Amino acid sequence: MPRRHLQLQLLAGLVFLCGSLGLLAAAQPTTRSTQPASQPTTQASRPTTQPARPIQLGPIRVEEIYQTIDDQPVRGWAAKIDLTDPRVEIRVTGPLERKPDDPPRLEARSETTAEWLKREHLTLAINTHFFARLDDGKGPYPESCPVDLIGPCVSAGRLVSHGRDDGQPSPVLAFTKDGHARIAMLPPAESEALYNVVSGVSETGGKSGGLLVENGRNTGATALVAPTVRHPRTAAGLTKDGHTLILLVIDGRQPGWSIGVTLPELADLMLKLGADAAVALDGGGSSSFVFAPPDAPQVTNRPSDGHWRPVGASLGIYLKP
């Protein structure tokens, strides 16, 4: 097994283990007040009982997810984006300008999804890649921490992170330059040649995994990571015609607010939202959903750490005038 491939297996497992030890959010449920996206302590602005009404902003429709599992609440936010609308532009965290003294595996410096959304003037953003810290790996996740992204990442045709060294496929959400989208298990050479690509992981801890939803079927039991454990989760999906992108973030590790979901439960939610294919992205304390309509309060999930975690990469929607 190539050395880098082994490193990726070990790092991906370590990253998710770190996320599993995240603190429970300390904030109390609120009504409709929000904090600016630039504040790292931003929390959700949501009703404590009934879901908010869906919000339509041009080609973006945002709706709250609320249900119960084993008599416990599960909450989150979903967005549906009309990819046929010419105003929609997909953005992915771009590559770094490397410095001579940077670590060899450095591919990104961590930044919260909320800060990235603000800097890129986006309307909507979620976190994406699993990642491994390249600092000492102790304590809270710091801003601008050097990280190695797990899985292929491409931003506007620029390679940010390579796929697996052994040539095996990874579960990806990929876009061509003309905006056509697909979710599939793609080998590195194919995924790295596309215009925008984000990915989940295909192997960790000696286990292999695939897509969350495939051809309209729930395949969450064989996706990664920790498919049978309830955690905060992030996922992306597409309708069968490929015209609608579905982004979903579910809160977790917060008894009384949201207990999180397993990957089969996450896949069920994606199927109910109309996904024919879906991929699980980084979850745990990294799960981030930020919707910032102009001249209106922003809508966010409640991160399980009680504040935004700086992450390795994010995906966003820029609405052209």
Image: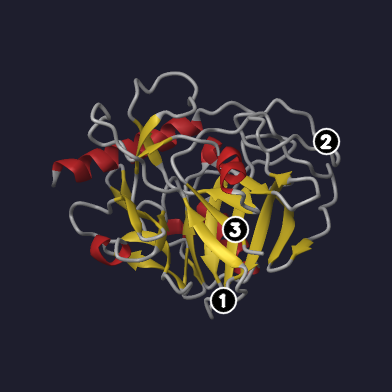
Q: Is residue 31 left or right of residue 11?
A: right
Question: Cα distance, mark 1 to mark 2?
Answer: 35 Å
Which numbered disc flags the more N-terminal residue, 1 or 2? 2
Q: Residue at image x 63%, y 66%?
A: 81
Which residue is labeled 1 in the image? 243
Q: Categorize mark 2 by other alpha carbons within 10 Å: few (<14), some (14-19), many (20+).
A: few
Which amino acid, mark 3?
Tyr
Outermost residue to the bottom = 241
Residue 242 rendering spot, x and y as whole percentages: 52, 76
Which amino acid, mark 2?
Thr
Q: Residue at image x 62%, y 74%?
A: 85
Which residue is labeled 3 in the image? 318
Question: Cα distance, mark 3 to mark 1?
Answer: 17 Å
* Relative vertical location of residue 196 with respect to residue 176 in this rendering, above or below: above
Q: Residue at image x 70%, y 25%?
A: 26
Residue 45 rendering spot, x and y as whole percentages: 78, 41
* Relative vertical location of residue 182 with respect to residue 315 in this rendering, above or below: below
Q: Quadrant of the C terminus?
A: bottom right
Residue 128 rendering spot, x and y as whole percentages: 48, 49
Question: Cα distance, mark 2 to mark 3?
Answer: 28 Å
* Relative vertical location of residue 278 with respect to residue 202 in this rendering, above or below: below
Which numbered disc flags the more N-terminal residue, 3 or 1? 1
Which residue is labeled 2 in the image? 30
For the residue pair 221 and 107, the one nearer the viewer reads as 107
